[in-house]
Amino acid sequence: MTATSAMSDAHTLEGVKVMVIDDSNTIRKSAEIFLVQAGCQVVLAEDGFDALAKIADHGPQLIFCDILMPRLDGYQTCALIKKNPHFAATPVIMLSSKDGLFDRARGRMAGSDEYLTKPFTKEGLLGAVARHVGTAGDGTAT
């Protein structure tokens, strides 16, 4: 039964374009491996400035964004993405090793759609993608 549900999840995520913004090479690579195995197209960015330069070119359907990054932190990056009318509806999921109520609230204030604690699991990462854009590929999502 779980193999069947895993297969349906993989089909649901096939072709979904996901951006991962994190200054940690390890986190970026882990997320990329999990997402590619599920059939997602992955765009990687090292920080907020790198991400903002790539978002318009790649048009991700979902963005994972680390909070603690140099130059432009995750809250600022998320707020800038959400202020752009072309990407305001794009789900942004904050990634952080902090799991405090204040951090979650601050993420919401910046416009994030969800908050995922690091280290994340494959199931947690893919579950977040499925919740936000799992059906976007078939044209039924709004």
Image (tube, grey):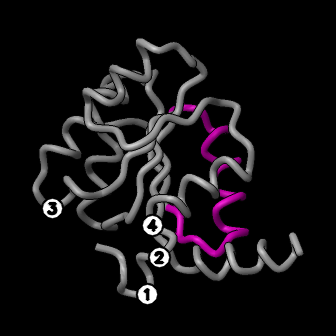
In the rendered image, residue 69, in percent from the top left (x then y), is placed at 43, 24
Distance CA(mark 2)–CA(mark 1): 6 Å
Q: Which mark is residue 133?
A: 4
Span colored in magenta = 23-42
In this rendering, position of residue 79 left or right of residue 135 = left
Q: Which mark is residue 78?
A: none
Amino acid type at circle 3 is His
**What residue is shown at x 47% (from left), y 46% (from top)?**
64
Describe the element under mark 4 as helix, strand or loop: helix
Do the numbered discs 2 and 4 sit on residues whose CB atoms are within 8 Å? yes
**What residue is shown at x 20% (from left), y 45% (from top)?**
82
Q: Nearer the viewer, mark 3 or mark 2?
A: 2
Quarter of the figure with residue 105: top left
Describe the element under mark 3 as helix, strand or loop: loop
Amino acid type at circle 1 is Asp
The residue to which callout 1 is attached is: 138
Q: Which mark is residue 135?
A: 2
